[in-house]
Image: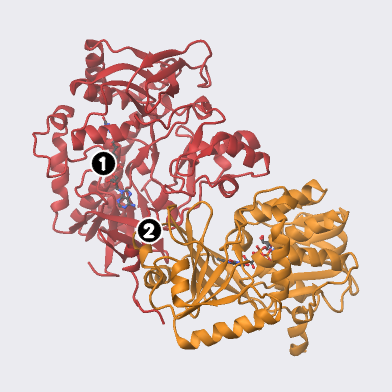
Chain colours: A orange, B red
Amino acid sequence: MKTDVVIVGGGLIGCATAYYLAKKKSNVIVIEKDAGVGLQASGRNAGMVRQQARKAALPLAMASVRLWAALAQELENDLGYTRTGYLKIALDEAGVAVLENEMAWEHAHGLTEVRMLSPDECRDKIIGLTDRVVAGKFCPTDGIANPMLVTPAYARAAQRLGAEIKTRTTVTGLLRQGSAVRGVTTEQGEIEAEVVVNAAGPWACHLNESIGCATPITPGLSQLMFTERRAHNLVCPVGVLGFGGYFVPTHAGNMVLGISGVPNKYGYSTRVEYSDITAKAAQMLEILPWLSQVSVIRTMSGITEYTPDGEPYIGAVPGTRGFFTAVGFHGQGFCLGPIVGKILADLITGKESSISLATFKPDRFARVQG
Amino acid sequence: MNDLTLAPLTVVGAGPAGIMAAYTAAEAGVDVTVIDENPLPGGQYLRQSPPEFTIPDVVAAHSGHPEAAALYRKLEHPRIRTMHNTSVWGVFDGRMLALAERDRVYLHKANRVVIATGAYDRPLAFPGWTLPGILGAGAVMRMVKTQWVLPGKRVLLAGLGPLQLPLADLLLESGVEVVCVAEAANLFLGWRHLSGFWGHGDRIWEAYTYIKTLVQHRVPVFHNHAIVSASGKEQVETATIARLDGSGQPIAGTERQFEVDTVCLGYGFLPSIQLAMAFGCEPRFDENLSWFVPRHNDHMETTEPGIFVAGDVTDFGGAKVALAEGRVAGLAAAHQLGALDDATFNRLVAPALAELRHMNRVALALQRIYRFRRGLAFLASDDTILCRCEDVTLAKVKQALADGAIDLHQVKLGTRAGMGYCQGRCCSALIAPIVAKETKQSISTLHPFTVRPPIQPIPLQMLATGAVSMAVE
Ligand SMILES: Cc1cc2nc3c(=O)[nH]c(=O)nc-3n(C[C@H](O)[C@H](O)[C@H](O)COP(=O)(O)OP(=O)(O)OC[C@H]3O[C@@H](n4cnc5c(N)ncnc54)[C@H](O)[C@@H]3O)c2cc1C
Ligand SMILES: Cc1cc2nc3c(=O)[nH]c(=O)nc-3n(C[C@H](O)[C@H](O)[C@H](O)COP(=O)(O)OP(=O)(O)OC[C@H]3O[C@@H](n4cnc5c(N)ncnc54)[C@H](O)[C@@H]3O)c2cc1C
């Protein structure tokens, strides 16, 4: 089999890249090990499309949010995207300073709509929020979308433009000719391509390493609790500084109660820990006491990726030809998916990225290690 | 009742199967913890009225379970500790059972486990099935027996299986008008299996007494008929049945309509496999049931070592099979725990297995005669709701399949079916045949929804009681 571009991994990054490439008339094949696209982190995350509190990736997040605005129309699919805003609160004075520093960074990058909220303003926004709130920071252009819809929508739109999605197929290695990558080997045979993109999420390391570019990623476990559907006061996602958890509304009326990830504690497993969910439930009741009689109907977890500096690896892999990667997105890949897919498609078709990718160079740790 | 007390044997479910498993193991010298979510033991069939109902239980007396009282007394065994009002809502770290008791949750460290969680009414989706007044037969049985509430005045019974007769009998004796009984089985196709009843005169006699009551009350019984639609404004007012063809599909032009205020649906039971699945037990597709049950060996052990199943959770066999399976499971668990040596175990298990085989002959014959007929899975029209929790219609499911979903999980992600309060307990068996048909796979190759804790919804307040440290740092 032969094609222009082979993409390893049918998560949001892989499917978005496929769509923007197909739009540029490239022949694309996405290879996904699971029975469908978006069944890993891309389909089981908290759905926050958040710019606030991003560090180096803030410009990417802002550009992505501009894409999100018209994405449902472009993909001809409801994505459940709404700009609800996002509230981040601090429970002590030290936290206020952190929020103010974040805001300075955000304003400096042009995210000028971010502003500090007084405790009363926070409690006006989220009725029943704890009295312990000392300050809040709000970004009105942050929002939510439905992760279950987004990756399949990209995949279908790509397919309409001629892209092929091969599910239940695992990529086992790269086809090489010197420093040039010529395709991939799969359990079902070889696929030749001019360009290969490694978008295999937390499973991506060995392919990059096989060509001499170590992209260290430690898997972590992020757990989610879903409440029953009911009327509630959570009008926008709420994050709590130093708390290790967050609260997200959904269109259906369920709430998502997120427990931040812990690196490497449970390897690649997607289990749910009794001690984590019970402890976090207790802590969450201190933040939103009215949750007490709301029932949890489901829990689940996904793998988050930890990189040494918390930033992803994006771009052409130095020292090779025809090989790109975009992995290691930690808790930001859902928001960033659209812009990263678009930028990769540009890079692959020979266009410069409009946003600097210097911080995200795939070989930044490979060099350190020598 | 503290966290992490290790019980050698834990039995989940205090129906006939669970009680018998617990008693048998206790007799063999094993300390047993029995856990059941109800305030009193008994399970489905031998369900007891709550203590506040002091009116003499004429219904129970009529349906005649003199054995019930004797069975409950088995739980008074000194080696058995019974935890009522306690449900198991998850399995963590392989053998930790998460329990919910009234307003708190905690962990219970299990060693060997007998899962005797029983079964629940199988839903059947047809136009109008979600109207108020349309009830599951098991739920009606429960209403009448434990709460003394009659479901309505004019009742139509539609279903598949031998339990329709005792239910009709119970309703008639309680003074309800039964307009007709629609039985979906084709007894003509089933007669080959009647040899299974050889040596079970009591069962035939029981059936005969029920039929006699129907005849006395001039209740028409339509064989090879199923309910195909129901309608009404606020609640069900009319119900339509039709004759079925060889594959169980209704034949156009054979419809009969009845004015009713209640419809009892008794299309069999689905095993409560959620806990077994949470343990990681491998499911087996049962052809007669056309659904999944936990796979087990002759000694009732599942594919997870030390985890046993007994009773209706394994497939629908009735109370006597449940007792026999409970006995085998109890012996096997006691043997594994070292309470019975090989010789004693073999001596005791042989007659128990012989008894089970004897019981299973009828059970299997009944399962074949009343096997779930394929056509019954396709009664819904496009606007019929399949997932009640999330209001997902057949049309939405078909759209998700047209959009590329190829299994139950992907249909769930695309439609939200199975994401609601019941977590797919009801809709998965309704949606799977549609998925199988549209994607041209065998339903036996589809995987039921993954089970994740909590098996039952748990308020956050309760979940929080399981926390070791309560402070926000
Ligand atoms: C619980 C949780 C909550 C989160 N919340 C948010 C949030 O609110 N906002 C946000 O922006 N981000 C969030 N994230 C992060 C976000 O979900 C991820 O960063 C993003 O989905 C990454 O997309 P991806 O395509 O790179 O990875 P993935 O979704 O992991 O996709 C990689 C795909 O590659 C496939 N694959 C791997 N190896 C192979 C192989 N050898 N052959 C073929 N296929 C292969 C995998 O099966 C997988 O489908 C959250 C993550 C989790 C786990
Ligand atoms: C309407 C009706 C009529 C019937 N008529 C007859 C008849 O005439 N003859 C006959 O032989 N049989 C009859 N049966 C069948 C009989 O009820 C069953 O075969 C028998 O009860 C099965 O016993 P069991 O122990 O397997 O399950 P059950 O009796 O169902 O007991 C299971 C118990 O487990 C509990 N449980 C389940 N999950 C959990 C959990 N996670 N945590 C805690 N507790 C849990 C349940 O609440 C229940 O108490 C009838 C059943 C019904 C519903």
Instruction: Please determine whether, in this image, residue B53 is positioned above or below residue A271.
Output: above
**Cβ–Cβ under 8 Å for marks 2 and 1:** no
Number of residues whose C-alpha sits closer than 10 Å to that of mark 2, classed few (under 14), some (14–19) or many (20 or more): many
Task: Identify the element where label 2 is drawn.
Answer: loop
Instruction: Please determine whether, in this image, residue B437 is positioned above or below residue B79.
Output: above
Where, by quadrant of the figure, is residue B131 drawn? Answer: top left
Left or right, A299 with respect to B471, comes to right
Establish whether labels 2 and 1 are both on one chain.
no
Residue A278, position in %: x, y? Answer: 38, 68
Nearer to us: label 2 or label 1 = 2
Residue denoted by label 1 = B323
Task: Identify the element where label 1 is drawn.
Answer: helix
Which chain is indicated by disc 1? B
**Residue type (three-letter) at the residue carrying disc 2:** Val
Which chain is indicated by disc 2? A
Q: Report if residue B186 is visible in the image.
A: no
Left or right, B324 with respect to A357, comes to left
Q: Nearer the viewer, residue A23 or B456?
A: A23
Residue denoted by label 2 = A294
Q: Which of B95 and B270 is in front in this view?
A: B270
Q: Which of A346 and B369 is in front in this view?
A: A346
Q: Nearer the viewer, residue B136 or A68?
A: A68
Q: For ligand 1, give the image quadrant.
A: bottom right
Number of residues whose C-alpha sits closer than 10 Å to that of mark 1, classed few (under 14), some (14–19) or many (20 or more): many
**Residue type (three-letter) at the residue carrying disc 1:** Leu
Residue B382, position in %: x, y? Answer: 57, 30
Q: Quadrant of the C terminus of chain A?
A: bottom right
